[in-house]
Amino acid sequence: MTSTRPIENKTESTAEDVLVTGSLWRAIWTMSWPLMLTTISSSLVGLADVLISRQLGSAAQAAVGVSEQILFMFMVFIMATGVGTTALVARAAGAKETEEVNKATGQSLALSISMGLLLTVLCLSLSGLLITNGDNAPEVAHNATQYLGIYAFVLIPFSLNVIINSAFRAIGRAKMPLIVILISTVITIAGDYLTVIGNWPVPGLGIRGIAFSGVTGSCIASLVAVTLLLRSPLKACIKSIFPLSKTYALRILKVGIPSALNRLSWSLSVFVLFAILRHCDNATAALASWTIGMRVEALIFMPLFALSMAVASIVGQNLGAKKIERAVQAGWQVTFIGLGMMVILASALFFGSDFLAHRMSADPITIDYTRSYLRTNAFSEPFLALAMVLSGALQGAGDTRTPMWITIVTNWFLRLPLAWFLAITLHHGPSGAWVAMASSICMNGILTTIWYRSRRWLTTTV
């Protein structure tokens, strides 16, 4: 029989109860500000990678983007397990089912660690083929092979960090992931500068130094995450790691697999976009500008990830506590916050595009393409807020299938055909691809909003 005892003692229970009782604005603030700092910190790593790789040339910048996109294809399965963890743990926490909280967390750890080991082997085995088939320029492919041959090992500590941080967020402990990510960020960025700029500890590491720094930062962060877990209300989850239960694995994967397919669909569509950019003039500059643009834009939309994760926990806990209207209202309130933020930040992105492009590259063509990327995508940022925040609310409810189908339709049936038509058929080059990207984001936001308003997602079971 499932326990109904509070997650730990009275004081700790009160800390988590803020998500299901009292002011909804307070609940949003409690979850949002630590996650905001967490996601901004994460985006700084990507930005630092691009800035440091600039010292090695446009081919190295493009290689970082290509390599991390390949790695993302493997990461999505671990991240999807984290989505399932959040949905199950948040529901159980809202219902005050302590044993269910610990069981779901422990089983998620077992599933994720197994995935991390398997995916590392697969990534190392397939990376060469994926890089070659990406139709990359020879210098880009060479750099990407060096980078990914080392950075693939990040999947192992990544598997631990994702699940532990997801479980912390699900029970309302948003400060814990912040500590873990800050440690990873500081170590990784410091390592980037030391290995590439400082030529330490071994001269001439180049792009391999950036990869080594990322793996080291993630490994140390995972040790910190495990330490925090063993000192938290979730410490009893360790007893539930093994053996892996088929029932729990299926429950986690039921929520997680559509999320994985969602992200995988997006990731694969990026490879098609890469191929389109390769058919443009100055292909290396086009790929480098995409890499730079995504990293700069990440500083803008990373706060949306924070709001998305925050609302997932709030919605999940309130549904577990049978507070349906509070759950629905939470989604709208967080969305309004996201819209307000994105209108302001998108304006800054548009008017600061020239300055940012010159800061991120020394190549005139790359600068021109980057400026175009930033200005075009600035118009789609408010719609991105709708898509990301409301998708987070749907994930908290366990509805990951609808966002998956919306992403598939908007990417594969709108973005890519339109990108080819504008960039290649009409000869607009990379700027045509940027217009297609912005158009698909706008449509994604509109469709997600329509589905959320329908409230049909409230019938989802986890």
Image: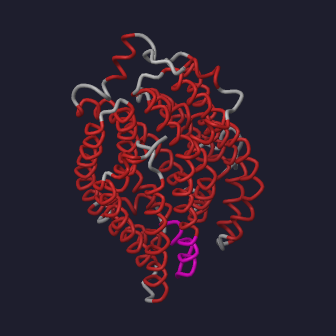
Quadrant into which the N terminus falls: top right
Q: Looking at this rendering, what residue extends furthest in the front direction?
A: 1
Picture quadrant where residue 200 is located: top right
So how many labels did they put on this image?
Answer: 0
Q: Is there any visible trace of residue 21 in the rendered image?
A: yes
Q: How is the image coloured?
A: secondary structure
Q: Looking at this rendering, what residue extends furthest in the bottom direction?
A: 426
**Could you tell me residue 374's position as x and y percent?**
36, 64
Residue numbers of the magenta segment? 272-289
- Residue 278 located left or right of residue 12: right
Q: Main secondary structure of the magenta part?
A: helix
Task: Give the vertical position of 275 relative to 65 (above or below).
Answer: below
Is residue 54 or residue 21 the one in the foreground? Answer: 21
**Could you tell me residue 19's position as x and y percent?**
32, 29
- Residue 376 located left or right of residue 176: left
Q: Is there any visible trace of residue 54 in the rendered image?
A: no
In percent of the image, x 39 and y 48: which residue is there? 394
In percent of the image, x 49 and y 35: which residue is there? 88
Is residue 388 or residue 349 the one in the foreground? Answer: 388
**Does the magenta portion include 311?**
no
- Residue 278 located left or right of residue 433: right
**Could you tell me residue 187's position as x and y percent?**
56, 34
**Does the magenta portion include 284?**
yes
In percent of the image, x 47 and y 70: which residue is there? 366
**Could you tell me residue 43's position as x and y percent?**
45, 46
